[in-house]
Amino acid sequence: MTVLRKEGEGTLKNRYLVKIRCRKCGEQFTLKGQMRKGQVETGFKRCLCDNEDDFDITMEKV
């Protein structure tokens, strides 16, 4: 079975390394994400301390 993909989808062209640091407790997360619909999606929802809004986020292209 052949899987057809749009150009740039599923390749390393739209992959990012995302570093998230919680401003409340200082916990750090390093995740891989993909650019979709103008935003990088990582699946990250909230910190271990239940913080959902207050983060320092940096991204770099892989």
Image (tube, helix red, strand yellow):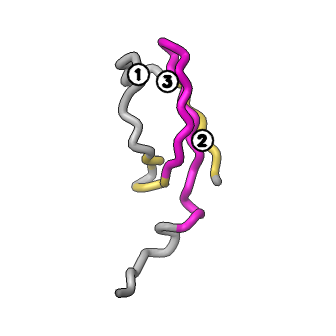
Badge 3: few (under 14), some or many (20 or more) residues near its Cα, within 10 Å? Answer: some
- Relative to 60, say whether 57 is above or below: above
Three-letter amino acid code of the residue under disc 1: Leu
Are the two marked residues, 1 and 2, in contact with CB atoms closer than 8 angstroms?
A: no
- Under circle 2, the secondary element is strand
Give the foreground label among 1 and 2. 1
Tag 3 residue: 55
Three-letter amino acid code of the residue under disc 3: Phe
Tag 1 residue: 48
Q: Residue at x 38, y 19 (%)?
A: 51
Counting labels gives 3
Are the two marked residues, 3 and 2, in contact with CB atoms closer than 8 angstroms?
A: no
From the viewer's perspective, tell me whether residue 43 is left or right of residue 40: left
Tag 2 residue: 59
From the viewer's perspective, tell me whether residue 52 is left or right of residue 56: left
| Sequence order check, earlier mark of 1 and 2 | 1
Image location (x, y in percent) of residue 61: 63, 51
Is residue 20 within the magenta segment?
Answer: yes
Q: Residue at x 41, y 37 (%)?
A: 44
Range of the magenta residues?
Answer: 11-33
Q: Residue at x 64, y 54 (%)?
A: 62
Q: Looking at the rendering, which quadrant does residue 4 occupy? A: bottom left
Image location (x, y in percent) of residue 9: 47, 68
